[in-house]
Amino acid sequence: MPEPTVIVRMKEKREALAAAARWRRVSFPALRACVAFVFARPDSLQRFDLERQKQMNQTDVQHLSPAAAAPAVPSATRVAIISANWHDDIVHQARDSAIRRLVELGADAANIQTFELPGAFEIPLLAKKLAESGQFDAVIACALIVNGGIYRHEFVTTAVIDGLMRAQLDSGVPVFSVALTPLNFHDHDDHHDYFFHHFVKKGEEAANACAHTLAEHARTNALLAGAQTPQVTA
């Protein structure tokens, strides 16, 4: 004879509760350990994905890395470097490393002028003014744009990058961006040290990009000038 329905249901409930208890004993310690690890430091989750981040970072992609491949820069090359004063101890690493690299490539340090502004939002207008002045062959903009101010950093970054692009398109003078916006930035030693050294790399990359771009523009200008020269026939 089948057991009464109530007894069957009570038995099923006891089995379900026992299974849940076993799951808690096995799973909760591991879950608590994961939660403790994640919240111990604000950047804990980022460490899981470090290798993939490196692959996405142009600094660490080997086929783009050899700085020695950058062409020589004529000593008369005139470069303006603008930097924002927010987190200036980090931002100035890009400015200073760009200057060092340009000088290594042959530029005269006397022809490299530096400018400082309160923040990143003010950079595009000055970049446009310097580019249109006819006194500079290239402009480099340096800034660290992070959350914590009045505006979300994504909106500020979009405005800055769009403005820099407009400045170079309107003026015909190359404008290079070291205006970086990390996904997360926490003002503790780990993040500060990482971005301190990261901006050194980015300044060098900007200088190398400047050298490559100016050399290619010079080659292109020579080709276009040759194509426009009228052919004299006998």
Image: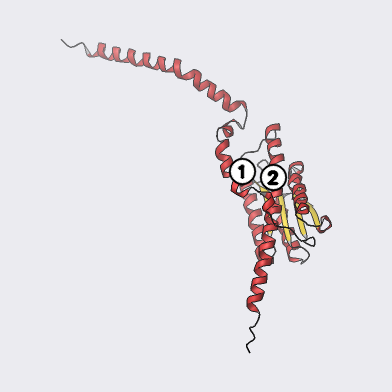
* 58 with respect to 73 (left or right): left
Establish if 196 lies above or below 216. above
* 113 with respect to 193 (left or right): right
Q: Nearer the viewer, residue 55 or 72?
A: 72
Q: Position of residue 195 (x, y in %)?
A: 69, 40
User: Which badge, 2 or 1, comes first in the chain's sequence?
Assistant: 1
Q: Position of residue 163 (x, y in %)?
A: 66, 58
Q: Position of residue 105 (x, y in %)?
A: 75, 54
Density class for disc 2 (Cα within 10 Å; few <14, some 14-19, many ≥20) is some
| Mark 2 lies on residue | 201
Helix or strand or loop: what does disc 2 sit on?
helix
Establish if 14 lies above or below 144. above
The residue drawn where x is 72% and y is 61% is 128
The residue drawn where x is 41% and y is 18% is 23
Density class for disc 1 (Cα within 10 Å; few <14, some 14-19, many ≥20) is few
Alpha carbons under labels 2 and 1: distance apart: 10 Å
Amino acid type, residue under disc 2 in the picture: Lys
The residue drawn where x is 59% and y is 27% is 39
Residue 61 sits in quarter: top right
Q: Position of residue 36 (x, y in %)?
A: 57, 23
Establish if 218 lies above or below 87. below
Amino acid type, residue under disc 1 in the picture: Asp
State which quarter of the image contains the N terminus: top left
Q: Which mark is residue 60?
A: 1
Q: Nearer the viewer, residue 230 or 175?
A: 230
Farthest-out residue, right: 110
